[in-house]
Every structure is written in structure tokens, then in C-alpha cells.
Amino acid sequence: MDSKSNVAMQTAEPLEEADNGSTNAATEEQASAPAVSATDNRADNDSRPPARVWLKTTGVRYLVRIMALVVAVVLWELASTNGFHFYINFDNIPAPSVVGVALVAELTGQEFYLHILHSLERVAIAYVMAVVIGVILGVAMGRSRWAEDIILPYIELLRPIPAVAWIPLAILMLPTEQSSIIFITFLGALFPVILNTVHGVEQTNSVLVRAARSLGASRTAILWHVVLPGAMPSIVAGLAIGMGVAWFSLLAGEIISGQYGIGYYTWNSYTLIQYPQIIIGMLTIGGLGTLCTLLVRKGCNPLLKWQAKGGRS
């Protein structure tokens, strides 16, 4: 009995040690698991920049942009006051200080604002028409070969014609100067919207289209939930480009046949030899065009929430 009990005790001791080892290992794993998850959480939190860092980075970027404009204005002032003449003649170019005084005088009156309102009205009407018609035609051309074969020849034939060349025909076709200027502005904005929409629709991932079709989605559902969201980045780019071309075309129409508008104001200042007013008109055109393009991009941002933002140094 003594020998048997000794053998049983010797056999039980390794088993108890094994059980204790496995229990200790499990305890160590449980103790280490929260530490790993906490480390992961800290890493995720660290990957997100704090609000203070984001504001500091954004502020620095805007400060750099403002300083770039300030440097350009200072160089302009020096070139105008010193009569810089090396390929570019600054003898007759008014300095920024002179333009600023003239701008203050223009802002105190009402006629300058009237020119701005007329231009904004024409751009708004023409641009909305161009966006609606351009997106519809672009989607049709991107989804249908028949539509592309029918519409594309007209676009490729008419697109290279500059806005100035349309002015005589627009005056002959349309009853009023207002309608002719809007027509010219509409044509300028139409072609970039159409071409970018066609490009975006044609570049839609065919795998997503086949997947939606295999799940029983209709053609309308595929268009609204797959094709248009996928083409939206290209469409938004076309809308921004179209806005810039719309302002260019508007000014061409206002210079030739307008009575009010920033284009007419700029050209009339040239005929009256009012050089500071020419600069004011040009800067106003640039500012309004930039503001309108920014509004288009900001207004389209909700349509691009699904798009991942890429990093840029």
C-alpha cells in the first residue's frame, strides 16, 4: 500500500503542476489583453490630429497664401512706381495704391454694384441651364452609344468656337442683348460639364454595376446609386471648370453687346482711358469667379462624403 500510494502521489504532482501552469498562462493572457486593446485605442486616438494642431496647420497654410498675395502686391507697387520696363512695361500701369483709392471711390457709388448684379444674374441663369442640360446629356452619352454617336459630333464641332465668334449670330438669333449674353455664357459653361460628366460615367467601375445587377437592381437604381455617385468627382470638376469658363464667356458678351456688367465696365474704362478702373474690373472678375467656383465646390461636398481623402504633403 505504501508503494502504491507513493506512485499515485508522484503521478498527481506533475498533473497539478500542468494545471497550475495552464491556469497561470490563461491569467497572464487575460491580464495582457486589456493592455493591448488600450494600446490600440491610444494609437487610434494618436492618429487623429487634435483640434489645436488642425487649426494651427490650417492657419499656417492660409498665412502662406496671404503672404504670397502680399508679395505680389509689393512687387507690383515697386514696378509701377519705379517704371519697370523689361519686356513688360509698367510705365502706364497704375500702382496698387492708386487702384485702391479708385476702388474706394467706386464703392461709394451705386453704379459699380449695378454692374456686379447684372453679371451675377446672367451667370446664374446661364450656369443653371448649362448644369441641368450638360449633366443630362453627359449621362445619356456615357450610358448609351447611340446617344454618344448622335450628340458627340455636334459637341466636337461647336466646342472649339470661341465665345466672341458666337456674338454676331447670337444677336441675330435672339431678340434682346440680355438673352444673347446669357446664350453665350451658357455655351461656355455647357461643354466642360458635358465632357466631364461623360468621362465620369464611362469610368464607373463595371464590377460595381455587375454586382448591383446580380442583386436585382433595376437600371434606374443602378444609375442613381452606382453610376452617378461613382461619376460625381468628375462631374464636380466639370462644374467648377464650367463656372470659370462661364465668366470668361460672359465678359466676352458684355464687352461687345452689353450695357451693364463687369465686362462692359472694364471695356468702357479702357475706352475712357481710366486705367485704375480697368484694374478694378479685372480684379472684380477674378474675385467673383473665384468666389463662385468656391461656392460650387463647397455646395458639392455633401455629394462626395463617400470619397476617401488622400494624404498630401
Image (spheres, rainbow, N blue to C red):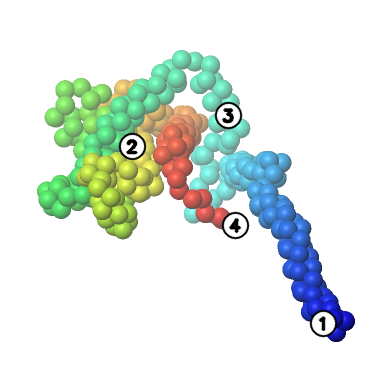
Q: Earlier in the sequence, mark 4 or mark 3?
A: 3
Q: Is residue 270 visible?
A: yes
Q: Dot 2: within a 10 Å radius of its alpha carbon, few (fewer than 14), some, or many (20 or more) residues?
A: many
Three-letter amino acid code of the residue under disc 1: Lys
Q: Dot 3: within a 10 Å radius of its alpha carbon, few (fewer than 14), some, or many (20 or more) residues?
A: some
Q: Could you tell me which secondary element the residue under label 1 belongs to?
A: helix
Between the C-alphas of marks 2 and 3, the distance is 27 Å
Q: Residue 33 appears at what percent x and percent y?
A: 71, 58
Q: Is residue 181 left or right of residue 230?
A: left
Q: Could you tell me which secondary element the residue under label 3 belongs to?
A: helix
Q: Could you tell me which secondary element the residue under label 4 belongs to?
A: loop
Question: Which residue matches tag 4?
Answer: 313
Asked whether the beta carbons under mark 1 and mark 3 sit within 8 Å of each other, the answer is no
Three-letter amino acid code of the residue under disc 2: Ala
Three-letter amino acid code of the residue under disc 3: Gly
| Residue 76 occupies quadrant | top right
Q: Is residue 264 left or right of residue 171?
A: right
Three-letter amino acid code of the residue under disc 4: Ser
Question: Which residue matches tag 2?
Answer: 246
Question: Which residue matches tag 1?
Answer: 4
Q: Nearer the viewer, mark 4 or mark 3?
A: 4
Q: Dot 4: within a 10 Å radius of its alpha carbon, few (fewer than 14), some, or many (20 or more) residues?
A: few
Q: Residue 99 appears at what percent x and percent y?
A: 55, 31
